[in-house]
């Protein structure tokens, strides 16, 4: 999902009456410098961990302001610098609005995440987050929110603030809107000190197109892996498959983590986890969501795992994924079997069939060349990362994989795949178990051969191959070509 820099997110919040810390945006060096004391914040779309990277600086003198502005304006992809007035803060809160795909208790809609503690280090307090689910069609009033905040000081003012945030989130069809911190000032007022938003490009209305426009780079600086992912998306456009490699070198002493983050919720939880830490380095940004197939998940995972510096892979979503988690686990298992250099993994499954996903990965764990750990959705990434150093590797395992020869039963274009039958594994010519497990009825057994049903559709879930390998005799395998060299 594209991210809006803070100066643009402020415009959205301001339009819905959310009070903000006074700030001025400069896209060139101003003739009259701001009055000290200010915080200078480089405005780079999608930039995370800004403070740790020196992209946010406190400037207490005119000289510091002048030097800070000059340096930050020269940063790569910097659209300008926000000079935000320093304020005396009595108390800090954290709040975010996210899209919520629903679970056994809640229908799909939105969710407000609120913590009575804001500021840096929110990643360590995810267990204390209050969640307020809401309908996008019938959003909560200030009174509704206030009831949920019972016992929290300043709840009427906070409820008013959160209601305006929710209205911004819905009004602009955002996928993520975060303010951290919401500051309480000496006079009791509540203001947003820092904020960020993410949006789905296709959801932006013509009326708001200008607000969401991000200047396009005229230079194509895509890496070979990014180009591979672009081609995967062109081959199989259903669902989001986003990958962008970090342009920075892995800092010494950090664990280099390849990430497969599923949706805005997964991305946000990961940013909350790593935002205040300098011992974890994310090699890439990623987003696999929007109902992509297991075939596509496999291909994107192979690209993500192919990053040569990676020491470990982390896969997590919001914990309430729309994508069937058993299909996702089948893709992970396939990628770990077929990669030339598989990565140790921390895998968090949450959503439909999460138990089956966990069971699958736990069943096959012993057969893999790398260590994996699985996590339930109740375990947040901030707890998962405590296992990083246990399984991260300095030396990638090398394994050989070449697809077993067989008879190509048929090929499909959407999503692209080749289905291979291995008759020698079925000497009695009985219908393989996997046929009956196909959720759409696409697979058929006719005249002692695997065939496809022209009336049905393959959704690329990988269930047939998983069942064939785990519970059958390996009668059916699926070959998924990759559009370039990956490890
Ligand atoms: S043939 Fe059926 S089980 Fe196999 S990937 Fe396609 S939909 Fe899934």
Image (tube, helix red, strand yellow):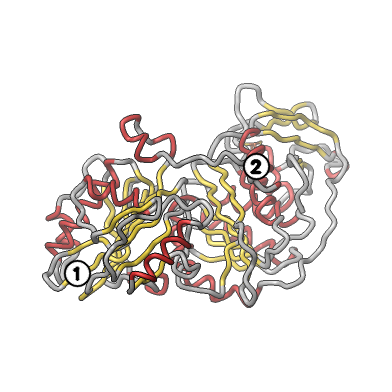
Instruction: Give the CA distance from mark 2 to mark 1.
Output: 49 Å
Q: Quadrant of ligand 1?
A: top right
Q: In the rendering, at what x and y percent does residue 438 appear?
A: 62, 38
The quadrant in which the C terminus is found is bottom right
- Left or right of 371? Residue 162 is left
Q: In the rendering, at what x and y percent does residue 469 appear?
A: 74, 50
Of the numbered discs in the image, which one, if any, rests on residue 108?
A: none
- Left or right of 474? Residue 50 is left
Q: Tell me the residue that label 2 is attached to.
A: 295
Q: In the rendering, at what x and y percent does residue 439 appear?
A: 58, 38
Above or below: residue 446 compared with residue 358: above
The outermost residue toward the front is: 31
Instruction: Count the labels in the image.
Output: 2
Q: Nearer the viewer, residue 481 or 271?
A: 271
Q: Nearer the viewer, residue 330 or 287?
A: 287
**Crowdedness near tag 2: few (<14), some (14–19) or many (≥20) residues, C-alpha within 10 Å:** many
- Left or right of 310? Residue 448 is right
The outermost residue toward the top is: 455
Dot 1 lies on which element? strand
* Ligand 1 under 8 Å from disc 2 Cβ: yes
Above or below: residue 362 compared with residue 391: above
- Left or right of 61? Residue 191 is left
**Crowdedness near tag 1: few (<14), some (14–19) or many (≥20) residues, C-alpha within 10 Å:** many
Q: Tell me the residue that label 1 is attached to.
A: 184
Residue at the spot x=82%, y=60% of the render? 399
Residue at the spot x=22%, y=56% of the render? 162
């Amino acid at each position: 999902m594209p991210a809006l820099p803070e100066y643009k997110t402020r415009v959205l919040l301001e339009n819905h009456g959310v009070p903000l810390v006074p700030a001025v945006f400069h896209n060139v060096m101003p003739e009259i410098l701001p009055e000290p004391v200010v915080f200078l914040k480089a405005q780079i779309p999608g930039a995370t961990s800004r403070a740790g990277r020196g992209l946010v600086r406190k400037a207490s003198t005119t000289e510091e302001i002048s030097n800070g502005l000059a340096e930050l304006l020269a940063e790569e992809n910097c659209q300008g610098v926000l000079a935000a007035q320093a304020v005396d803060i009595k108390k800090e809160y954290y709040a975010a609005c996210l899209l919520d795909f629903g679970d056994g208790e809640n229908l799909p809609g939105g969710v407000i995440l609120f913590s009575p503690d804001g500021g840096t280090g929110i990643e360590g307090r995810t267990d204390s987050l209050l969640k307020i689910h809401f309908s996008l069609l019938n959003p909560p009033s200030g009174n509704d929110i206030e009831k949920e905040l019972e016992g929290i000081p300043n709840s009427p003012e906070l409820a008013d603030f959160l209601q305006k945030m929710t209205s911004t989130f819905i009004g602009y069809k955002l996928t993520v809107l975060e303010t951290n911190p919401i500051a309480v000032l000496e006079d009791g007022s509540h203001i947003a000190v820092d904020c960020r938003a993410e949006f789905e490009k296709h959801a932006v209305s013509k009326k708001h197109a200008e607000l969401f426009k991000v200047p396009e780079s005229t230079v194509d600086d895509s890496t070979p892996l990014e180009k591979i992912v672009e081609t995967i998306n062109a081959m199989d456009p259903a669902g989001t498959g986003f990958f962008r490699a970090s342009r920075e070198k892995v800092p010494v002493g950090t664990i280099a983590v390849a990430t497969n983050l599923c949706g805005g919720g997964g991305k946000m939880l990961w940013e909350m986890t790593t935002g205040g830490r300098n011992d974890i380095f994310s090699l890439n940004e990623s987003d696999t969501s929007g109902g992509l197939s297991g075939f596509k998940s496999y291909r994107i995972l192979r690209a993500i795992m192919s990053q040569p510096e990676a020491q470990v892979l982390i896969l997590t979503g919001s914990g309430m994924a729309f994508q069937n988690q058993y299909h996702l686990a089948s893709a992970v298992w396939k990628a770990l079997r077929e990669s030339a250099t598989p990565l140790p993994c921390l895998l968090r499954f949450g959503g439909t069939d999460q138990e089956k996903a966990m069971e699958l990965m736990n069943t096959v764990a012993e057969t893999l060349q790398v260590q994996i750990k699985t996590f339930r959705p109740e375990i947040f990434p901030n707890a998962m990362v405590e296992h990083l150093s246990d399984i991260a590797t300095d030396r990638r395992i090398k394994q050989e994989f070449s697809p077993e020869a067989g008879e190509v039963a048929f090929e499909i274009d959407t999503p692209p795949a080749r289905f291979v039958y291995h008759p020698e594994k079925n000497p009695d010519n009985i219908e393989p178990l996997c046929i009956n497990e196909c959720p759409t009825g696409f697979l058929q057994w006719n005249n002692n051969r695997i065939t496809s049903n022209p009336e049905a559709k393959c959704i690329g879930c990988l269930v047939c191959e998983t069942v064939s390998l785990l519970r059958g005799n390996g009668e059916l395998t699926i070959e998924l070509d990759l559009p370039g060299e990956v490890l």
